[in-house]
């Protein structure tokens, strides 16, 4: 995009010198805000309709404006629009083209409006649409997880705390933990949408306008819940962008944690899963390598989204009321956050159905590390021993196991009875992995039957919000 100083500035009236060529480039946002063209045109069409509805312009002027703006949209979509750096941003590029196209009437579009309320409106329209798309992308990922969780409801793997074997859990239960995190992410985005869906138009530059505008009418045309209550606030705050980026950073943090598990699990040491070849890459030097690039990149990209959140908070924090040009810097972090999140959700939903689950490796890992020690302690409690004493008894049995290289279910009854006379032959039922998980069948527990009912609950939640 070349600088083109021959273009007349819409604000050129009070200037006697032309803009320095580098300053023109430096201050322009057209390189990135052209992405808002659809929202800018939709906002302008609604504004034009309101101007005619209130008698500020005539109906025929309104239809010329609307036709002109629709024509520009097709030009842009056909690739027949030369964006000009001299015209600074998407708003002035489109307005100037409108004037070229329809003549004098085009100059009336900006009545009762400023780029300040215009850009805030564009951004809110853009973000509302993106939030809807992201919510659907979260739904899709949750659906993929639920299918996998149902399929793996009986699969057992070690559950970890401190990355040390803790207790056996079902893989279905583990996967459903991720759907719960995503559920909160979805709710946060929807909640943010409520505060996004408020209309700045009518605030004009900062103080409102002397024209008899009808903001409720414009808001209704654009599908906003209501006009913003304070004009100074409407043009200046970008808290809705920050709030969105904060919700997005949380989704990315969740995906990053999930990535870390996929990376660990697909290592030769864990070998719990195999990622599909189509989602991995090789090494240029080590022929055996199959690297989990996709989850590694998602983990890495969570850093950049967190970075955008911090930049936006920093961008906003020193600004006095009302609009300041600083706010032009809100777009690139916002756009990149949207794109990064969209890509990450998509690649996860595409990749997960194609993973191979190594159930045998999961089960044998769960058989190491005395994962049913707590079950033995609970068993002793049921036989009348206080939990602290039971804990001590099992601790001694584990020490014996460490010394002899045997896990608890591998010990004989005599061996186990050395530690407590209350241990009877029925102990082996609780020491198995299956017995351990089956016992945790309360709401939110890891038992296969509980996984199946949690799957049904998540499914009906998903169906409920999409009906
Ligand atoms: N390109 C500007 C932005 O992104 C549009 C608003 C400009 N307003 C102004 N008074 N210079 O924020």
Image (cartoon, rainbow, N blue to C red):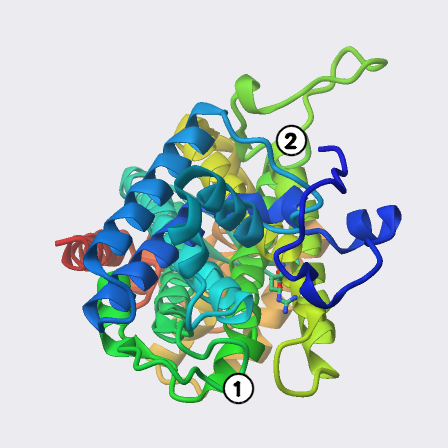
> In terms of image quadrants, where is residue 415?
bottom right
Foreground residue among 390 and 171: 171
The residue located at (59%, 79%) in the rendering is 392
Q: Circle 1 — which element? A: helix
Please give the residue where the numbered disc 2 appears in the rendered image. Answer: 292
The residue located at (61%, 71%) in the rendering is 395
* 433 to the left or right of 325: left
When the figure is inspected, residue 365 is found, relative to residue 373, above or below; the finding is above
The residue located at (71%, 45%) in the rendering is 86
Please give the residue where the numbered disc 1 appears in the rendered image. Answer: 232
Give the percent coordinates (x, y) of residue 180: 38, 61
Label located before the other in sequence (2 or 1) = 1
Residue 76: image tag: none
Give the percent coordinates (x, y) of residue 133: 36, 48
Give the percent coordinates (x, y) of residue 430: 36, 59
> In terms of image quadrants, where is residue 401?
bottom right
């Amino acid at each position: 995009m070349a600088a083109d100083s021959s273009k007349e500035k819409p604000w050129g009236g009070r200037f006697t010198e032309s803009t320095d060529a580098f300053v023109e480039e430096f201050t322009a946002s057209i390189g990135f805000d052209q992405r808002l063209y659809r929202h800018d045109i939709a906002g302008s069409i609604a504004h034009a309709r309101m101007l005619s509805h209130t008698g500020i312009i005539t109906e025929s002027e309104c239809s010329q404006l609307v036709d002109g703006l629709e024509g520009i949209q097709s030009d842009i979509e056909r690739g027949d629009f030369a964006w000009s750096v001299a015209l600074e941003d998407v708003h002035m590029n489109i307005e100037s083209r409108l004037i070229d196209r329809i003549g004098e009437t085009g100059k009336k579009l900006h009545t009762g409006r400023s780029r300040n309320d215009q850009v805030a409106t564009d951004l809110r329209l853009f973000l509302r649409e993106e939030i809807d798309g992201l919510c659907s992308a979260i739904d899709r990922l949750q659906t993929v997880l639920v299918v996998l969780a149902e399929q793996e409801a009986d699969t057992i793997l070690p559950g970890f705390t401190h990355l040390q074997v803790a207790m056996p859990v079902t893989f279905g239960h583990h996967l459903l933990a991720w759907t719960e995190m995503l559920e909160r992410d979805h709710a946060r985005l929807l909640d943010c949408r409520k505060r996004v869906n408020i209309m700045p138009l009518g605030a004009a530059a900062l103080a409102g306008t002397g024209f008899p505008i009808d903001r409720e009418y414009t808001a209704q045309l654009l599908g906003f819940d209501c006009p913003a209550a304070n004009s100074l606030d409407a043009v200046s705050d970008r808290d809705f962008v920050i709030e969105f980026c904060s919700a997005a950073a949380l989704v990315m943090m969740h995906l990053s944690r999930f990535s870390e598990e996929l990376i660990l699990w697909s290592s030769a040491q864990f070998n719990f899963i195999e990622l599909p070849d189509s989602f991995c890459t090789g090494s240029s030097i080590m022929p055996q390598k199959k690297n989990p690039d996709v989850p590694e990149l998602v983990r890495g990209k969570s850093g950049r989204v967190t970075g955008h959140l911090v930049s936006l908070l920093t961008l906003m924090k020193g600004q006095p009321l009302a609009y300041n040009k600083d706010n032009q810097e809100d777009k690139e972090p916002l756009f990149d956050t949207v794109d990064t999140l969209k890509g990450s959700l998509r690649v996860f939903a595409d990749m997960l159905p194609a993973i191979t689950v190594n159930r045998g490796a999961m089960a044998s890992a769960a058989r190491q590390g005395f994962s049913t020690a707590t079950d033995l302690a609970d068993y002793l409690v049921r036989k009348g021993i206080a939990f602290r004493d039971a804990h001590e008894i099992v601790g001694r049995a584990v020490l014996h196991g460490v010394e002899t290289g045997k896990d608890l279910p591998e010990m004989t009854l005599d061996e186990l009875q050395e530690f407590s006379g209350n241990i009877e032959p029925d102990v082996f039922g609780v020491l198995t992995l299956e017995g351990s998980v089956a016992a945790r069948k309360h709401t939110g527990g890891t038992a296969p039957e509980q996984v199946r009912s949690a799957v049904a609950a998540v499914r009906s939640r998903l169906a409920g919000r999409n009906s």
